[in-house]
Amino acid sequence: MKSPRTPFIFPLFNHHKKSSSLFSHFSTPESTQFPNQQRFNLLYTKILSSSVNPENKDFNFSHNLDSPTPQKPTYKIASFDNLSIKNVAFHAHFLGTFETTQKPLNFIQIRLFSASPSDHFASNSDPIPVVSTVTSPFESSPPIDAGSSIRKPISLWPGMYLSPVTNALWEARTSIFERLSNIPESAPPQSELITKSPSKSRTSILYKFSDDYILREQYRNPWNEIRMGKLLEDLDALAGTISFKHCSSDDSTTRPLILVTASVDRMVLKKPIRVDIDLKIVGAVTWVGRSSMEIQLEVTQSSEETSDPSDSISLTANFTFVARDSTTGKSALINQISPETEKEKLLWKEAEERNRMRKKKKQEQKREIDNEEVNRLNELLSEGRIFCDMPALADRDSILIKDTCLQNSLICQPQQRNIHGRIFGGFLMRRAFELAFATAYAFAGSAPCFLEVDHVDFLKPVDVGNFLRLKSCVLYTELENPTQPQINVEVVAHVTRPELRSSEVSNKFYFTFTVRSDAMSNGQKIRNVVPATDEEARRVIERRDAERS
């Protein structure tokens, strides 16, 4: 066999006139012959498999046929040292370009899905693997047949267009969906409920950021931090998978339930999440009511500085899902839960208390505004009236709420739907976060840092084809701590139906950001935000009270 530094060449024939072409060849290097007809650079070789090492190995180099020696490797994942020892055949892919173009290659991006071949619903020991959904610009493979897939048909349509985690979770749900797809519409509901332990629904996913450069790039924002909106989307996808696992049964004759995200409790970022260290999300059902359940997710990231496991927790999220009968649309009974360990029992008690507090808050929201709140309204509006009536005399360190607004409009596409044909709750959360981030960015004048997202209620479902309008504003700021001022952003999602001349609020999101310490040390100032109308003042009071509760 030739030296591992010797380029392996497969020719570009005359009938390939494009600036770049992809070829596959299965041979030993000695058997490869080529006519000296075209001058091209061989940029990349990928070993798909070999008897030495079944894992994928990549090696990239540039070589010109007129040059007696190959150039210095520009991108190297693994060498061919093992292959040079044993005279083995291998399968390699070549990506070439005619030198006359004088331009870099336009590399093909390929959707790549990978998941463990084992059934993730049969075992909870191993995390669901997550890989990038596009390949490296240095990576190539034969063209993908757009009409074929290694995935089973039932798992093709929902979720496959979203994040790598959503892809992996949809693959894990395939076994359940295949069973559900064969059930007739006339099938009866589940007659006997099952009592399950939290461990039966426990699921974890692992982001190998330290090893997977492409995955890391998919989650990195321009400031080398995690894309929090994408992580929120993944959390909702994982919670959905856990709810399906808990509500599933072995009875293939009963009709399935519709499971939807009802609400998300406040999520507080305990420590920054890095994109160069592996990240893990673990979740399970912690509490079950009559037709609702709570799923708790923990986002953990360990490093050399975190010896205590509790210190590795970056974020804790509690999702509430509700079950509906797929035929009648009414609430449906779900499998019960039996906590076994002391921790599971403690989580159940905490979730029970949260559920009680949610019901109490709903009752409190129905009461009338008292005299004390009228005084608070007038106090808030006093400065806003100066802006409206005497703008030249208004405080230059303050700004009206209406002057901080942004909005975004989109048509909800089929690629964003879940198995029930509705839009993913996680997709809505991501879009709301990204608009809130932009709002805080435009307001502060520097990139904000995410602190928390308050309780989210999903009031109305969003369907495919809906005209969705997201409207945001800075509702108020908290300037008591000059080193870490807080910017509270409201995002309201409106489902607009032009044909019916109607517009309804589907969701309200409340995000809290701060400004980086280096920006504050350079003299940056955050302005006070004041309402100008009674309606704006009421929204501010409601949010401040919710923050304190």
Image: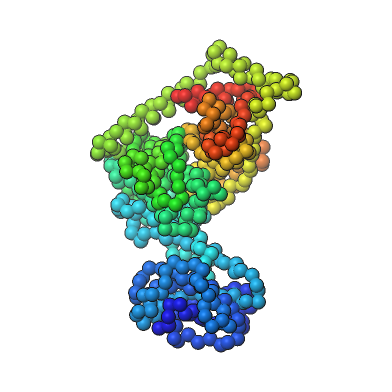
Give the camera-side residue of 123 and 30.
30
* Callout count: 0
Q: How is the image coloured?
A: rainbow
Side (left or right) of 534 relative to 83: right
**Residue furthest front in the image:** 522
Which quadrant of the figure has residue 17? bottom right
Q: Where does the C terminus fall, quadrant-wise?
A: top left
Give the camera-side residue of 251 and 457.
457
Residue 461 placed where, x, y %? 52, 40
Q: Residue at x 36, y 47 (%)?
A: 304
Q: Residue at x 60, y 34 (%)?
A: 524
Residue 36 placed where, x, y %? 58, 87
**Residue furthest top in the image:** 371
Position of residue 119 relative to residue 330, above or below, is below
Q: Where does the N terminus fall, quadrant-wise?
A: bottom left
Side (left or right) of 207 relative to 537: left
Residue 143 placed where, x, y %? 53, 70
Give the camera-side residue of 427 and 449.
449
Residue 85 placed where, x, y %? 35, 79
Residue 243 visible at all = no
